[in-house]
Image (spheres, rainbow, N blue to C red):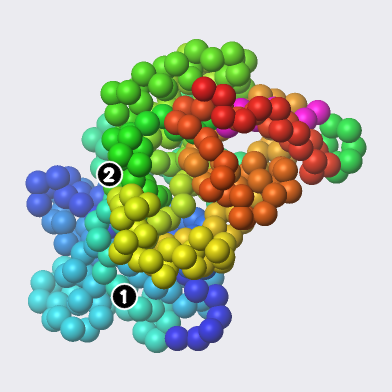
Amino acid sequence: MSAGRRLRVEADGGSRGNPGPAGYGAVVKDAATGEVLAEVAESIGRATNNVAEYRGLLAGLRAAAEVDPGADVEVRMDSKLVVEQMSGRWQVKHADMRRLAEEARAVLPAGRVDYGWIPRAQNSHADRLANEAMDAAAAGRTWQRTTTAPGAAPAVPPAATPAVPAAAPAAPAGGGGEPLDLVIVRHASTPLTEQRRLSGRYGEDPGLSESGLVEARRAAECAEVRGADVVISSTMRRSRQTAEAIAERTGAPVLVDPQWDETDFGDWDGFTAAEVVRRWPAEFAAWSQDPAVAPPGGEPLVAVERRVRQAAAALRARWAGKRVVLVTHGDPLRALLRDCLGCGAHLQRRIRVDPASRTLLRLHDDGTSEVLAVNRV
């Protein structure tokens, strides 16, 4: 493979009955930064799991070719069958899958695509898209993407809340336009939060615990969220549940943006910090000292900072003069706060943000910002 641009395709498919109502999902990312570049999903009628997985692979490869036809592509799937067959180690005996495998090989030159297996927990994004497509078909509608490309304003979910108010035009830099009031809410507690375990963007994706549901309802009652024009959430379940509680109380629409997802902790996902130190002492030490070092199989802090900075710029441009509630996670929240304060990465782990806490920022059109409050609980 060349040393040029590298994309990552994560794909999945499923069948409710095997065979039964089936669908696929695929996501294309920048392999270096983890930024989401494209999402595709579709219900395909009655099919088997394996056929749905191959359809997801084919759609992901085609989406990657549209993003950058000259890029190298790493395909990651939790289907051992598809990975081994496309790698040439296993024969493709089923006629339908053989046809789809041939179509997939024809999308990009063989030397520019490599295949690798990942655990199901690390393929949750594509799995979610596949299930969204099947859910949409069961409801008699076509799947629609709920997020937009990095740096662009997120789109309204298809079965979501009321129409979004027209965005205020962004004022020119330094032009004295109205600032954006940003209320950042860390998601409420999950079982993993309560156990102090790492829970990254491609991990288990737990929902809120009983205590977390109470925290979310309390956050929805707080004065800081009143008068919100919109609630922005990461794609992760705990954030969306917290955002929905706030939206239900405030009447504001919920928009979803993957750039606000938690850090990808890779192999460390699900472990406590003490367990990580015991199992990966050298890797943890390097990660703690250098923001460009990633956890094994994960995402470095510099990549989180980059996507957070892009997402904040998009918010600043679209929602000037508005009040935005942003429901996100510990690392993106700290990265944004540090960026506003001009603090280095060495302070990342020294900033405490409790579950369901609120941090208040005011972002001005000239790029300056004010920190009004941190970690209100």
Residue ID at (65%, 50%) = 309
Q: Which mark is residue 115?
A: 1
> Residue 194: x and y, percent?
33, 35
Q: State yes or no: residue 290 in magenta.
A: no
Q: Earlier in the sequence, mark 1 or mark 2?
A: 1
Tag 2 residue: 131
- Height in image: 367 above or below 225? below
> Residue 178: x and y, percent?
81, 28
Please tell me which residue lies in front, 98 or 13: 13
The quadrant in which residue 107 appears is: bottom left
Q: Which portion, as a residue range, is magenta?
A: 178-184
Badge 1: how crowded within 10 Å, few (<14), some, or many (20+)?
some
> Residue 189: x and y, percent?
37, 31
- Height in image: 319 above or below 41? above
Please tell me which residue lies in front, 20 or 211: 211
How many numbered marks are there? Answer: 2
Three-letter code for the amino acid on which mark 2 is drawn: Asn
